[in-house]
Amino acid sequence: MVIFYLLLSVALIVLLTVKWKVHPFIALFMVAIFYGFCVGMPTNDILDSINTGFGGTLGKIGLLIVFGSIIGAFLENSGGAYSLAESVLKIIGKKRVPTAMGILGYFVSIPVFADSGFILLSPLGKSLSKKAGITLAASACALALGLTATHTMVPPTPGPIAAAGILNADLGLVLALGIPLSALALIPGLIFANRYASKIWIDPNPQMSEADIAERLQTAPNAVKACLPVVVPILLIVLKSVFASKAELDSNLLKVIGFIGEPVVALLIGMFLSFFLPKNFDREMLSTTGWVGQALSNAASIILITGAGGIFGKILQNSGIADVLGTALSGVNLSIWLPFLLAASIKTAQGSSTVALITAASLMTPLMVSQGFDTEIEKAMVVLAIGAGSSVVSHANDSFFWVATQLSGMDVKTGYRLQSLGTFIIGTSAALILFLTYLIIN
């Protein structure tokens, strides 16, 4: 019945937001409580899930959305985003914008969380799409899929590392196999973005005309200066990822690197750098009616919706749905498809890729020998099968679904058509590649 109630809850969210035009925050919040009562959760557990789900989600990405929105506002209003877009378009061409965004997301998400990567790169995707005269749907979809591919299958993101540790798999082998696997899985995702998502029109910036862009370009900073608020935070986060385990470095230096490499601090630095973009800086830009005020107003709705998605996900986690699915599937002998299906069912049920990776790895631990996963390469493949499953599928109970759709101007129906279907494509593509590889080595 918990599976039935989950499907009913998803259907209710779509009905409320698409047909009845209810705000996603209200829809998610009410459906989360409805699900909790349906599955018989105690009222105290429901209330605790609401508080921890909302606070825990926004504790991780709330400030990132705020600082990212401010960076985006200064990039756009100063003309820096369009200056940067012109330079990039000269290199990649107008027809290759979605592919370029997908590849960029693929590399950025290796050291940077997918949420942070999307927040940082979405202004670039919008400006590139506007200058190229194409729909934002294709570039936003490609960016989200590129970020998802490496976030779920390539260390050093926490999920794959945790799964490798639980299954005692060689992390170097997981990395060596994960990079080509995720890259191959992304190819169908990019085809999907270019062929399917490109048919759905989303104006990258409906308030901006070609004349407005031309006017802003006259006073815009150069492309090098414009890229600093985006590139510097990414480099700082990468720096922390690279040097965090270097014990031979001076401990004080490590503390500094660890501090400035935290995503919140890195984006805060990026925000301050964005203040240097306008040709003539005015303190009014920082006021409640200025660029900052407008950015925070726009961010408020995204933050609330993302927090409500966190509530829904936490109530699903605390309802024990992952254990129900894990128990149902763990007794079935499906070769390399078993870890994939375990992770996919848990991910779809409760929303978090990291939770799906850890839970599925824990369920697989006592089954490794009986399922015939003995060698080091087979252990690594199980980790990657779990990683592939943990991307299937991103929908209403996943905070990244709301970050990607709301920052891109997608409604819930379009989000399911692009984000949910896109993650299904890359996850199942990775699983199919793994299955064929498993057949070859056995």
Image: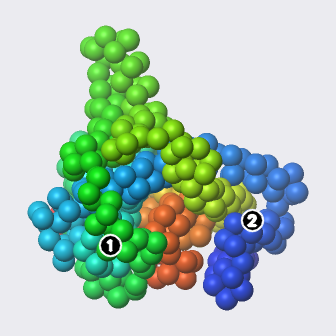
Give percent across and percent down for residue 401. 51, 66
Badge 1 element? helix
First-in-chain label (1 vs 2)? 2
For the residue pair 441 and 264, the one nearer the viewer reads as 264
Relative image position of residue 325 (x, y in whole percent)? 60, 67
Residue pushed farthest right? 43
Is residue 174 at all visible to an observer of this figure? no
State the residue position of label 2: 29
Q: Nearer the viewer, residue 265 or 254?
A: 265
Q: Residue at x 29, y 42 (%)?
A: 228
Identity, as a three-letter code, of the amino acid under mark 2: Phe
The colour scheme of the drawn protein is: rainbow
> Is the residue 77 above or below the residue 129 in the image?
above
Amino acid type, residue under disc 1 in the picture? Ala
**Residue 251 showing in the rendered view:** yes
Instruction: Give me the residue at 36% from left, 38% from top.
Output: 276
Q: Residues within 10 Å of mark 2 (few under 14, many from 20)?
A: many
Drawn side of residue 176 relative to residue 289, left or right: left
- Nearer the observer: mark 1 or 2; the answer is 1
SS category of the residue bearing label 2: helix
Assess whether mark 2 and mark 1 are in contact (beta carbons under 8 angstroms).
Answer: no
Residue 221 as seen in the image, left or right of residue 18: left
C-alpha distance separating marks 1 and 2: 42 Å
Q: Nearer the viewer, residue 264 or 46?
A: 264
Mark 1, residue position: 211
Residue 434 image offset from top left, x and y in percent: 27, 67
> In which quarter of the view is residue 32 placed?
bottom right
Above or below, 425 relative to 161? below
Instruction: For the C terminus, give its image quadrant.
Output: bottom left
Above or below for 212 versus 247: below
Label ID, residue 142: none
